């Protein structure tokens, strides 16, 4: 069942993967930059004060660039611009890292591999269900579903009035590490 998989992902940590991912997040990259003023404005709109935006870097690279977020570093392809919706999704992973550490890396990998094995595509790891939206807390959801909720709230103004999305975003904004 998916619930058993969700529980397993909370206990199965790939510590070497997490350590290597954050240690070498900038590996084989160039053109490291801070967030632009527009990107910062989008981030503040969503996360309020829950992110240390000064720690975030965007790097261009030819590997692991889906975009991919490792710690505070968002990796993008050399020929790709970071559109606002994708930026917010990737900043959700930065939020996970800044508030909960590297566990999101194992969680994301677990759910993407499980999705490929179950459906042939990693996209299933991103699909929201009614059960997900009824979760007691955003923290009870897998990493990619957390990022999708945050991304959807940003991209769809109508969802800002939805009580489930609103409560999840309130949790995100109130979860900054002290």
Image (cartoon, rainbow, N blue to C red):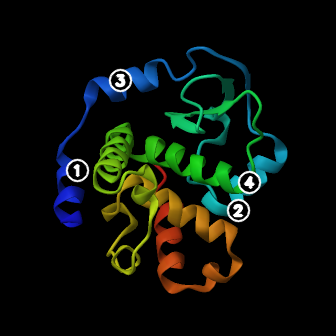
> How much space separates mark 3 and mark 2, taking CA atoms?
31 Å
Quarter of the image where the N terminus is located? bottom left
Q: Which mark is residue 84?
A: 4
> How much space separates mark 1 and mark 2, taking CA atoms?
29 Å
Dot 4: within a 10 Å radius of its alpha carbon, few (fewer than 14), some, or many (20 or more) residues?
A: some
Residue 62 image position (x, y, % from top left): 64, 22
Residue 44 image position (x, y, % from top left): 69, 56
Helix, strand, or loop for circle 1? Answer: helix
- Residue beneath the point at 67% across and 49% down: 87
Dot 1: within a 10 Å radius of its alpha carbon, few (fewer than 14), some, or many (20 or more) residues?
A: some
In this rendering, does residue 10 appear at all?
yes
Name the foreground residue: 41 vs 132.
Answer: 132
> How much space separates mark 1 and mark 4, taking CA atoms?
30 Å
**Which tag is nearer the camera, tag 3 or tag 2?**
3
Residue 98 image position (x, y, % from top left): 47, 42
Pointers 1 and 2 in contact (C-beta within 8 Å): no
Pointers 3 and 1 in contact (C-beta within 8 Å): no
In this rendering, does residue 178 appear at all?
no
- Residue beneath the point at 35% across and 62% down: 141
Name the foreground residue: 96 vs 16.
Answer: 16
Helix, strand, or loop for circle 4? Answer: helix
Q: Which mark is residue 19?
A: 3
- Residue beneath the point at 74% across and 27% down: 78
Looking at marks 3 and 1 on the same chain, the residue that comes earlier in the sequence is marked by: 1
């Amino acid at each position: 069942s998916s619930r058993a998989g969700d529980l397993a992902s909370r206990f199965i940590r790939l510590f070497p993967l997490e350590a290597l991912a954050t240690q070498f997040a900038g590996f084989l990259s160039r053109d490291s930059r801070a967030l632009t003023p527009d990107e910062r404005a989008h981030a503040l709109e969503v996360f309020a004060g829950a992110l240390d935006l000064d720690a975030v870097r965007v790097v261009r690279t030819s590997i692991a660039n889906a975009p991919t977020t490792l710690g505070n570093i968002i990796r993008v392809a050399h020929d790709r611009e970071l559109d606002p919706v994708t930026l917010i999704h990737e900043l959700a992973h930065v939020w996970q890292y800044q508030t909960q550490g590297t566990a999101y890396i194992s969680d994301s990998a677990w759910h993407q591999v499980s999705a490929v094995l179950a459906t042939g595509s990693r996209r299933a790891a991103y699909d929201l269900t009614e059960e997900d939206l009824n979760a007691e807390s955003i923290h009870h959801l897998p990493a990619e579903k957390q990022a999708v909720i945050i991304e959807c709230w940003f991209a769809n103004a109508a969802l800002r009035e939805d009580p489930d999305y609103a409560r999840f975003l309130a949790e995100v904004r109130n979860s900054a590490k002290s």
